[in-house]
């Protein structure tokens, strides 16, 4: 697959494109690759082959992450990990995740082709569950590697009623994917910006300074299902208009903050979901983020109070369950300097920017220093099939990553 292409950033983009369709997608006519689905297994196989071709030994860890290792001069030296995620959102783009993995493969391929090794091993890791689009949790598999996941967090069931325990991983050994502290020197993630800033400034790449804090809730609104023709308006306890009012409250509260606070209702389901039945139950999600954890928490508290008040006024039941809480995660200052130097070395102007999107890097920060490189994407569009990356920008990103690796290697050489 995608044979005949010369190694490099453009090949990484072409490989992302190849992974954007069946059998690497779980949906027809678009891309959805859920954690541990058949498309996920097929994509892992393709990436494993590319890793092996680039001189890496490949294995799947206990959390179903795919890891390719390119040995260093000193096998005992803490490894540099380079990675991102193989899963996608529903009807997503082709580059959010896979590009960071496949640029890592290209960086190793370049070393392998020239018969060189760094003082430390390089491990390219394809995480499984960054998006949280299958199970009601996110970044499970990177949290397992970082050693921050708790066993009780594995008690999960997907939208089809399949438990994580039955989805193709062994829950009893899942947490053994944790890497011992001190064994990973740094984690490097290249990712499309998913925003418009680099493009607006005519820049191909930028150094990420940190990642915004996230909270996610699962809300259940309970009313009374009933006949759409016979129940008068005055006697209804319709869960859906109540939920609609709550959705508008979420938007109003985040807008009123006039800060970097953002809040999103991304999934909503009315039950039983029939044209002639008053909805007796509505389930929806809320995602709240800010670069400032205190602001995020204040905004989330106002939202939770507001939706409870709406439920009470409408005599609806409500449960609001916190399902995901990740603190803001600053990137490592010394690695940011190294990234700026690598950007300059690749003939590009350095530019620092913050990430509103979540990334596996924010989880890996608990294990080791982290660095992120953002790559310009067209119109800032992401989580959308229109997501687009220019192959020339991917070449620049690869040059920056290679320069970053060389600089880190030189630091090791000098003790
Ligand atoms: C992942 O893309 C997220 O920011 O939710
Ligand atoms: Mn994403
Ligand atoms: Mn991503």
Image (spheres, rainbow, N blue to C red):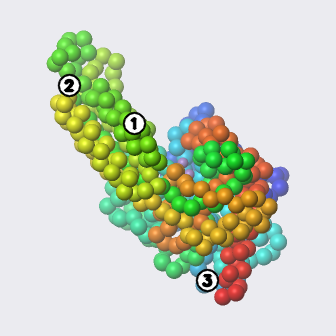
* Residue at x 52%, y 43% (from the top left corner): 89
- Judging by the rendered image, the residue that carries numbered circle 1 is 251
Secondary structure found at label 3: loop
Q: Nearer the viewer, mark 2 or mark 1?
A: 1
Q: Nearer the viewer, residue 29 or 399?
A: 399
Q: Position of residue 16 (x, y in %)?
A: 68, 48
Secondary structure found at label 1: helix
Screen quadrant of the C terminus: bottom right
Mark sitting on residue 186: none
Question: Mark 3 or mark 1: which comes first in sequence?
Answer: 3
- Judging by the rendered image, the residue that carries numbered circle 2 is 237
Residue 108 seen in this snapshot = no
- Judging by the rendered image, the residue that carries numbered circle 3 is 77
Question: Mark 3 or mark 2: which comes first in sequence?
Answer: 3
Question: Quick check: 236 left or right of 346?
Answer: left
Residue 195 seen in this snapshot = yes
């Amino acid at each position: 697959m995608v044979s005949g292409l010369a190694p490099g950033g453009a090949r990484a983009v072409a490989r992302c494109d190849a992974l954007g369709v069946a059998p690497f997608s779980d949906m027809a006519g678009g891309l959805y690759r859920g954690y541990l689905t058949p498309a996920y297994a097929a994509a892992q196989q393709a990436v494993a082959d590319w890793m092996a071709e680039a001189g890496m030994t490949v294995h799947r860890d206990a959390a179903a992450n795919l890891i390719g290792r390119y040995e260093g001069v000193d096998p005992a030296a803490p490894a540099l990990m380079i990675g991102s995620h193989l899963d996608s959102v529903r009807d997503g783009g082709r580059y959010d995740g896979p590009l960071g993995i496949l640029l890592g493969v290209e960086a190793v391929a370049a070393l392998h082709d020239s018969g060189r090794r760094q003082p430390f091993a390089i491990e390219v890791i394809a995480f499984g569950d960054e998006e949280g689009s299958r199970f009601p949790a996110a970044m499970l598999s990177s949290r397992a590697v970082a050693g921050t996941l708790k066993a009780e967090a594995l008690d999960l069931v997907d939208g089809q009623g399949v438990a994580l325990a039955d989805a193709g991983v062994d829950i009893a050994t899942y947490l053994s994917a944790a890497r011992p502290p001190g064994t990973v020197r740094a984690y490097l993630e290249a990712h499309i910006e998913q925003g418009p800033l680099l493009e607006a400034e005519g820049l191909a790449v930028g150094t990420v300074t940190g990642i915004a804090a996230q909270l996610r809730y699962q809300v259940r609104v309970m009313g009374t299902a009933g006949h759409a023709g016979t129940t008068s308006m005055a006697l209804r306890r319709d869960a859906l208009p109540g939920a609609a009012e709550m959705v508008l409250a979420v938007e109003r509260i985040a807008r009123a903050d006039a800060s970097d606070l953002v809040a999103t209702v991304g999934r909503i389901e009315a039950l039983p979901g029939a044209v002639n039945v008053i909805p007796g139950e509505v389930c929806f999600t809320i995602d709240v983020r800010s670069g400032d954890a205190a602001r995020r928490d204040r905004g989330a508290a106002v939202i939770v109070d507001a939706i409870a008040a709406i439920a009470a006024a409408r005599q609806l039941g409500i449960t609001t369950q916190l399902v995901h809480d990740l603190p803001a995660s600053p990137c490592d200052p010394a690695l940011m300097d190294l990234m700026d130097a690598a950007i300059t070395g690749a003939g590009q102007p350095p530019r620092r920017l913050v990430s509103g999107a979540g990334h596996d890097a924010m989880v890996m920060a608990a294990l080791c220093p982290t660095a992120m490189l953002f790559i310009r994407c067209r119109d800032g569009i992401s989580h959308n099939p229109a997501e687009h990356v220019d192959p020339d920008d991917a070449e620049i990103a690869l040059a920056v990553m290679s320069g970053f690796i060389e600089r880190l290697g030189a630091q090791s050489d000098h003790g």
